[in-house]
Amino acid sequence: MEIYKGTATFSGIAIGKILYYSRGEYQIRQCLVSNIKKEISNFQEARIQAVQKLNELYEANRLLNEQEAGVFLRQIKLLESESYQNAIESSIANEKVNAAYAVMINRDELVETFRHLEEPVIRRRINDMQEISNRLIQILGGAAIRINLGDEPVILVAEALSPTEIMEMDKDKLLAVVMHHGSAVSHASIMAKTMEIPTLVDVAADDEWDGKTAIVDGYTGTFYLNPDAEIQKEYEIRLEADRREREELLKLKAQKDETKDGSNIGLYANIGNMSDLSSVLFYGAKGIGLLRSEFQYLGRENYPRENELFRAYKKVAETMGERLAVIRTADLGADKQAPYLDIPQETNPIMGNRGIRLCLDRRRMFKAQLRAIYRASAYGNLAMMFPMIDSEEEMDEIWQIIEEVKEGLREKDIPFKEIMTGIMIETPAAVMISRELAKHVDFLSIGTNDLTQYTLAMDRQNPLLKDKYNDHHPAILRMVRMVVDAAHQEGRKVGICGEIAADTALTKKFLEMGVDFLSVVPACVLPVRKAIRETDLGGEKVSAVK
């Protein structure tokens, strides 16, 4: 038995045979052709087939995750572009080569030209070019495109996978996904999470594993190769318990978030795109405690228009109905870059021009988002909060801009509601002045992910520090208590929306501190609800705001 430690990006347990998938770049032999017209026709027929297939894939996956399924629309646009078709047809005509070879050399030229550039838009275009090229080459060669998982469900092991490859797989044949490269926020991991497939990354995959038995522990990030009988028996028991627990948890969907002694707790969901709206309702969350609006700004080449933002927020408001939906204004910068933002290179972008700092620096962008939120407020129960606030001066500036936005809407007779506002507490500075900050808004929400890395002076994305990064550090828990006490002194509610909000080992402690609400990813709503309902505070909870 061999044991490997990786990083779990979606929880769950899987036991089964390994299918090792090796993606290669398709290499095609050059063939000189005499009938240029027929070869161009072959290319066009393959291109039309590829577009049809990509359309089918988009329709099949957009309800799961519309943002990630957008990759298929990008690839269709590329296939239908006149410049791409002209490039391939010119290669066929000028070089007198077969269509598959023309596609390959155009792919390789693009990759070679831009391979040293790391800009997200360029990297995305290269990936799209590689995928459509491989698709065309397979069609021209008559090869199957879909990964054949076989007749029985398997644990798929690979160096890396694209979201396209995952979305084309038969979910019923997929027990788990294990990759060497990737992260919790990679597109492939996001798609696997959307499909609720246990997933590990950072596991050094080997093609010799093909056909061997393995166990994936998506709770601890552990991968067992050729497990011994004792470990396999243990995990078979855990797998069955996992299934039973899920069945029991689903019975809690309509239950209240209430402790044994009758304390009501707000349990909300964090979402990062529009496709997660259905999960919020499915798991019975009280509403949306954190809608990360960055998805509207990333993966594109220019600023989103106000009407585009408005339509998205209106859909959120209408879908949630009476449930509260809290939209966090764009937390861009740092690891969330877009070329059109034109942010100068920074020595330490994590501590640079990000979050509210960037919004106040780009007032036109900020005002467009505020107008969209206020316009959409007329259609439901919206609230908004601001990221990376460090000072009262920032809040004074924000309120000045808000008043300008609202006055502009009144002048045009555009209806809107006076909505609740909140602040993300994400830095030690914000913790220390949280009572002063609370006076400016209706609620505070502690973002423990950033708060932990800023307090411990550790980059949470640094793999060298993953064993030292500790969001249970006593300093973090003391800071949570400090913020709760400060907020309640000003009659404000306070919640937690970082990853530790979903840690059921801490649920009772947070409730005893007086935390008023928790916001977690949709899949964690029911386990946290179970923990809440099993908690008896017995008068230990500090006075919460009514």
Image (tube, rainbow, N blue to C red):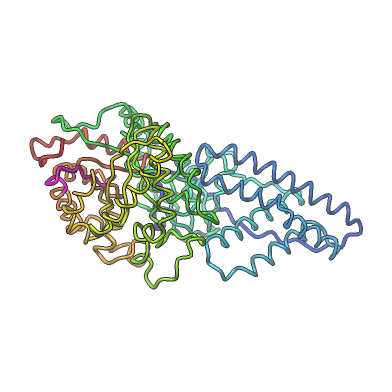
* Observer able to see residue 397: yes
Instruction: Left or right? Give the position of 108 relative to 290.
Output: right
Q: Position of residue 330 (x, y in %)?
A: 39, 52
Q: Residue at x 28, y 58 (%)?
A: 394
Q: Position of residue 129 (x, y in %)?
A: 65, 57
Please identify the quadrant where the N terminus is shown.
bottom left
Q: Is residue 72 magenta?
A: no
Q: Residue furthest front?
A: 411
- Numbered disc total: 0
Splitting the image into 4 quarters, where does residue 13 fall? top left
Q: Residue furthest right?
A: 34
In this view, the residue in front, 491 or 145, is 491
Instruction: Left or right? Give the position of 119 relative to 474.
Output: right
Splitting the image into 4 quarters, where does residue 349 fall? bottom left
Magenta region, residue range: 487-496
Instruction: Left or right? Give the position of 24 relative to 193.
Output: right
In this view, the residue in front, 242 or 259, is 259
